[in-house]
């Protein structure tokens, strides 16, 4: 083994650690990898930055713009409205229609975008059906993943693997080449969730038999006693606060906690009451005479009570707020709203809100003036999950946007032009026809994905260039290969599935594809089954909330715990592994 191979293996090892550690953003880790490879001389500067012009990176960028066009016309929301009307009749009908709908949409639109659009719709549907959001949000995310593996453009991973296959001399994937096994995954996944999975999901946030209005308290917020309050000197039971369904956990006076039980304390001007309650009660707190709702970030600048809304928003994957605090992100300045509560990593935060480092899946309770609601919707860092006034969509452009999407898919499927060309042309048409503005097109691009792909592809190139991929392939052939190509292909699926559970699915695919191709060549068989195993496994991650972006997006709103994904997702991963082991060789033989 050469020195360059040792260095590439070391970089790969530390890359996996950093991706799994999650203390550094994945896009930053990817760029660090690229810089290390360039500085070491393993790849040239041109080779190092070639990932940014890679067909996969450009195609994924164009597809994100196309998804943005559908969002800004309101096409997907229109479909979601139909789902709501159908689903209100029965929970099981709602579950089936939801998973089929998002599965179909995710076959042609970025699956994370589909989940983001459907989040507030599903939250409203759960209220209508009087069921816990946790019972619908996990099926929402999983359904999107089921559909994403049905076409070439269903996920960025499919596009990435197809482009890498071409680079290594294999034919590109067809638009519907994934469909034959993808439909089996979709059907099997929906059946599993309907018959088994939903029953394993805890009713997070609800107690059995309780009505929706009795939902467990969500937030810890603070209210301050005003100097002109009529109840000065009275205990809480003699104030308007006693009429609300809230829990006063403690009282702070002059910076010190009052040691008496809160219900026995005679209130004084300036007393701060730390109250635990749900979002509906927070709205009522704003209207109480003598109390002022406040947050640590705005001690001396409380918003006016009139003309404001309270909304809940979840920080999405690839958010600009990831790894930031509210203070560093200048949240109040950019959004015009005040954060009154944060559900962070499953815990309710009540103090020093502006200093909490935020991560995808965190839920913010935001008070925002009515005139800034549109600004809040345009802020790309999170997804609003409350039922507030939706932004004005260009509904008259829905037929145009749908026509463009159909043309992109059809032209690529019929071989008229490559998907790279059709996706770029479709993106340009979205802007030219007014489906979205140029600024909205830029906003639709998830730049973290672009930099992740651009950087991590350099590592794949280094593995192939230095012979590291061939070395690892020979080791696999010498061990698992004695059992035959099916066992090796099955091992690749399992390895990809496990790795994707702790790091980015695209990073996993980029690392394993060179090894998979080298392994197939070492065994003298077609590489297609190995490529398919890696692709399906990387896009079908159910065991953790960080394995796929849509899982991260529902983590906070569903109040899930890490163990919930393990309990529901592990059997699903095993089912798909067994299906892939026996069916991929049927659809893509080792010796065609």
Image (cartoon, rainbow, N blue to C red):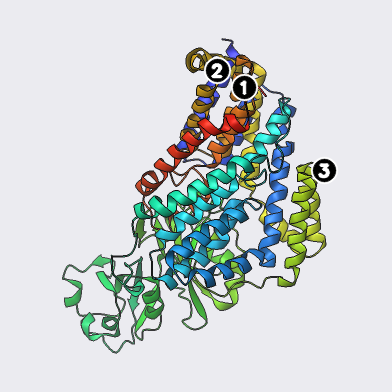
The image shows residue 385, relative to residue 270, as above or below, that is above
Residue wearing tag 1: 463
Residue wearing tag 3: 417
- Kindly give the residue lying farthest to the bottom in the view shown: 230
Residue wearing tag 2: 472
Where residue 395 appears, x then y in whole percent? 71, 71
- Label 2: element kind: helix
Instruction: Check contact, mark 2 vs mark 1: CB within 8 A.
Output: yes
User: Which tag is nearer the camera, tag 3 or tag 2?
Assistant: 3
The image shows residue 370, relative to residue 321, as above or below, that is below
Where residue 339 appears, x then y in whole percent? 46, 66
- Judge left or right: residue 427 versus residue 228: right
Q: First in sequence: mark 3 or mark 1?
A: 3
Q: First in sequence: mark 3 or mark 2?
A: 3
- At 56% from the left and 10% from the top, the residue drawn is 1
CA gap between label 3 and label 1 equals 31 Å
10 Å crowding of disc 3: few (<14), some (14-19), many (20+): some
CA gap between label 3 and label 2 equals 36 Å
The answer to whether residue 366 of the structure is visible from this angle is no
Q: Nearer the viewer, residue 533 or 13?
A: 533
Residue 67 picture quarter: bottom right
Image quadrant holding the C terminus, namely top right
Please tell me the numbered disc located at residue 170: none
Where residue 370 appears, x then y in whole percent? 56, 78
- At 62% from the left and 56% from the top, the residue drawn is 105
- At 44% from the left and 73% from the top, the residue drawn is 128
Instruction: Check contact, mark 3 vs mark 1: CB within 8 A.
Output: no
10 Å crowding of disc 2: few (<14), some (14-19), many (20+): some
- Label 1: element kind: helix
Residue 291 picture quarter: bottom left
The image shows residue 461, relative to residue 381, as above or below, that is above
Where residue 478 appears, x then y in whole percent? 51, 12
């Amino acid at each position: 083994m050469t020195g360059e191979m040792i260095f590439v293996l070391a970089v790969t090892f530390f890359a996996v650690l950093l991706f799994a550690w999650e203390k550094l953003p994945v896009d930053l880790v990817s760029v660090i990898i690229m810089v290390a490879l360039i500085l070491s001389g393993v790849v040239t500067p041109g080779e190092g930055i070639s990932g940014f012009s890679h067909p996969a990176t450009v195609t994924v960028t164009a597809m994100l713009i196309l998804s943005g066009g559908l969002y800004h016309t309101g096409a997907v929301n229109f479909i979601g409205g139909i789902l709501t009307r159908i689903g209100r009749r029965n929970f099981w009908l709602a579950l089936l229609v939801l998973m089929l709908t998002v599965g179909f949409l995710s076959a042609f639109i970025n699956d994370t975008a589909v989940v983001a659009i459907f989040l507030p719709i599903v939250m409203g549907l759960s209220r209508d059906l009087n069921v816990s959001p946790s019972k619908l949000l996990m099926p929402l995310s999983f359904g999107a993943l089921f559909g994403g593996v049905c076409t070439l453009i269903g996920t960025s991973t499919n596009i990435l693997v197809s482009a890498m296959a071409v680079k290594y001399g294999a034919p590109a994937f067809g638009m519907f080449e994934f469909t034959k096994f993808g439909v089996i995954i979709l059907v099997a996944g929906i059946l599993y969730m309907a018959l088994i999975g939903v029953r394993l999901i805890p009713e997070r946030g609800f107690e059995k038999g309780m009505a929706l209005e009795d939902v467990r308290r969500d937030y810890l917020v603070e209210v301050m006693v005003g100097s002109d309050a009529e109840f000065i000197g009275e205990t809480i039971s003699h104030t308007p606060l006693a009429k609300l369904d809230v829990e006063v956990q403690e009282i702070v006076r002059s910076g010190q906690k009052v040691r008496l039980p809160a219900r026995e304390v005679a209130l004084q001007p300036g007393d701060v009451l730390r109250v635990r309650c749900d979002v509906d009660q927070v709205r009522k707190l704003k209207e109480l005479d003598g109390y002022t709702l406040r947050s640590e970030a705005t001690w001396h600048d409380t918003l006016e009570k009139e003309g404001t809304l309270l909304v809940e928003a979840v920080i999405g994957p690839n958010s600009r707020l990831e790894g930031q605090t509210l203070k560093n992100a200048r949240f109040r300045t950019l959004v015009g709203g005040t954060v009154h509560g944060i559900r962070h990593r499953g815990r309710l935060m009540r103090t020093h809100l502006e200093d909490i480092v935020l991560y995808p899946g965190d839920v913010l309770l935001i008070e925002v003036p009515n005139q800034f609601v549109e600004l809040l919707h345009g802020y790309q860092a999170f997804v609003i999950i409350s039922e507030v006034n939706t932004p004005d969509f260009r509904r008259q452009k829905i037929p145009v946007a749908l026509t463009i999407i159909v043309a992109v898919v059809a032209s690529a499927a019929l071989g008229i032009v490559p998907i790279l060309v059709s996706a770029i042309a479709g993106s340009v048409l979205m802007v030219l026809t007014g489906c979205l503005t140029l600024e909205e097109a830029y906003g639709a691009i998830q730049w973290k994905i672009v930099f992740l792909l651009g950087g991590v592809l350099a590592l794949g190139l280094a593995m192939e260039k230095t012979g590291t991929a061939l070395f690892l392939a020979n080791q696999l052939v010498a061990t698992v290969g004695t059992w035959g190509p099916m066992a090796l292909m099955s091992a690749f699926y399992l390895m990809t599935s496990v790795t994707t559970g702790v790091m980015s699915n695209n990073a996993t695919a980029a690392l394993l594809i060179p090894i998979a191709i080298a392994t197939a060549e070492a065994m003298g068989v077609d590489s297609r089954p190995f490529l398919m195993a890696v692709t399906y496994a990387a896009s079908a991650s159910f065991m953790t909330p960080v394995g796929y972006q849509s899982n991260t997006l529902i983590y906070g709103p569903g109040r899930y715990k890490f163990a919930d994904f393990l309990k529901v997702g592990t059997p699903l991963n095993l089912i798909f592994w067994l299906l892939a082991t026996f069916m991929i060789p049927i659809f893509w033989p080792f010796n065609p």
